[in-house]
Amino acid sequence: MLEASKLAFLKKAALAAVKSEQKTRQPAELKLAQAILESGWGKHSPGNNCFGIKAKLSVPESQRQLLKTTEWFTQQQVIAFLQGDKSREATLRLGPDGQPQKKGTRCLYDVLDWFAKYDDLADCMSAHDELFTKPPYRRMFDLY
């Protein structure tokens, strides 16, 4: 049996996923499973954003929120990221040995970045569905 908090999120998210499926035909079960995994059963979904969808800088601030996250950047990518908006921050994360944490040419950064904010979970589910109408996902969804 699920804990009460998980069951409450499941009910709320399932209703939102079905509402979104009715508009987009994209399977409620898939987006519900992903929402559970990515948000930790709704514990990490600030602004009803259960997928961690980033916000474009062109979106009004009332529809986005500045949150902490981590990113793997090359030197060129971190420079471009910081030039995009003065509100953004990126701090190189160092390992226990005092050296940057690396994967090939990328280093791990603690960042402050803009994420989308939604009125409710149904709006978030619909935005998630929209991602599947664009490359690279569109071709795969069409095959589905």
Image (cartoon, rainbow, N blue to C red):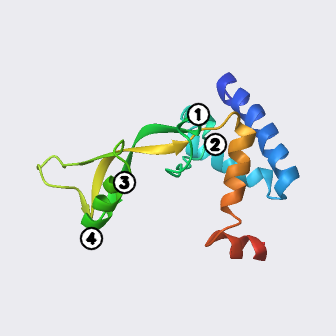
User: Closer to the observer: label 3 or label 4?
Assistant: 3
First in residue order: circle 2 vs circle 4:
2
First in residue order: circle 1 vs circle 3:
1
In the image, 40: left or right of 122?
Answer: left
Q: Are marks 3 and 2 in contact (CB under 8 Å)?
A: no
First in residue order: circle 3 vs circle 4:
3
Q: Mark 1 = which residue?
A: 47
On the image, the x and y values in percent for residue 9 come to 69, 31
Amino acid type, label 4: Gly
Q: Are marks 2 and 4 in contact (CB under 8 Å)?
A: no
CA separation in Å, label 3 and label 4: 14 Å
On the image, the x and y values in percent for residue 23 come to 85, 52
In the image, 84: left or right of 106?
Answer: right
- Residue drawn at the location 52% of the way across and 50% of the way down: 54
Q: Mark 3 = which residue?
A: 71
Res 16 visible: yes
